[in-house]
Image (cartoon, rainbow, N blue to C red):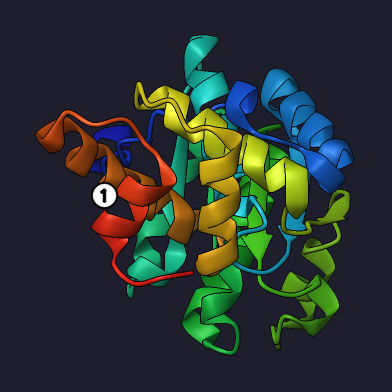
Amino acid sequence: MKARQLPLAVQLPAAADFATFVPGPNAEALAAVARLAETAAGALCLHGPRGSGRTHLLQAAVRDVHRRGGQAMYLALPEWRDPGLLEGLEVLDLVALDGMDRHAGDPRWEEALFDLFNRLREGGRALVFALDRPPAEAGFRLPDLTSRLGWGPVYALRPLRGPALVEALQRHARLRGLELPADVATYLLRRERRDLAHLVALLDRLDRAALAARRRLTIPFVREVLGGEA
């Protein structure tokens, strides 16, 4: 399969960059993924709950390879049904697979993933993949694939808390040209689910509202936009 037949690359969000990642308790994982992107060889596994930074790091690795003039692709596997999309990916310098365990237990997917691991390894390419749970608990049934999950280091990611989460929100706000005062960020954390993806989606909503109203982000304005008291 030729490279032109591969799935078109996902448009990476502006925040998908190592520089915008607030490491908090995940500094070691950040450094490891950055090294993998730089060398474009080997494999690395990330696992952790939603909002722990898995997608950010995978997409940042792809952007970094692109910046260096290489070829890389990010794929959110839960969005795909046909494992045939994995064919031909070995032509890339780095492959980033998100939500890989969504297809655990499906023989077609497990065989396709096993074959991809082998092709990337034989070609000296890089693979970084993300799971909800540790590899041993991911639910894969193919023994050969299970062994491949340990091809490289494994890092457990933890969601940001407290000041680190405030800092992450403020970085995302700056990317949108918004000034997010610390008291407003803290207010959002107090009233909303502490899931970074959810909070960033709220920032987009607040950005549109602030632009339309020509208002700055203050607690009264945020309360007005989101409704209710907290």
- Side of 222 where 224 appears, left or right: left
* Closer to us: 60 or 94: 60
Secondary structure at badge 1 equals helix
Residue 129 visible (yes or no): yes
The percent position of residue 53, horizontal first and vertical second, equals 64, 50
Picture quadrant of residue 163: top right
- Side of 94 where 150 appears, left or right: right
Q: Residue furthest left?
A: 212
Q: Residue furthest top?
A: 68
The percent position of residue 192, horizontal first and vertical second, equals 50, 67
Picture quadrant of residue 120: top right
The percent position of residue 193, horizontal first and vertical second, equals 54, 69
Q: Residue at x 31, y 47 (%)?
A: 221
The residue at which mark 1 appears reads as 205
When the figure is inspected, residue 78 is found, relative to residue 41, above or below; the finding is below
When the figure is inspected, residue 144 is found, relative to residue 151, above or below; the finding is below
The percent position of residue 110, horizontal first and vertical second, equals 58, 76
Picture quadrant of residue 4: top left
Residue 15 visible (yes or no): no
Indicate the quadrant containing the N terminus: top left, top right, bottom left or bottom right. top left
* Closer to us: 182 or 105: 182
Q: Amino acid at mark 1?
A: Arg
Query: Dot 1: within a 10 Å radius of its alpha carbon, few (fewer than 14), some, or many (20 or more) residues?
Result: few
Q: Residue at x 43, y 52 (%)?
A: 75
- Side of 225 where 163 appears, left or right: right
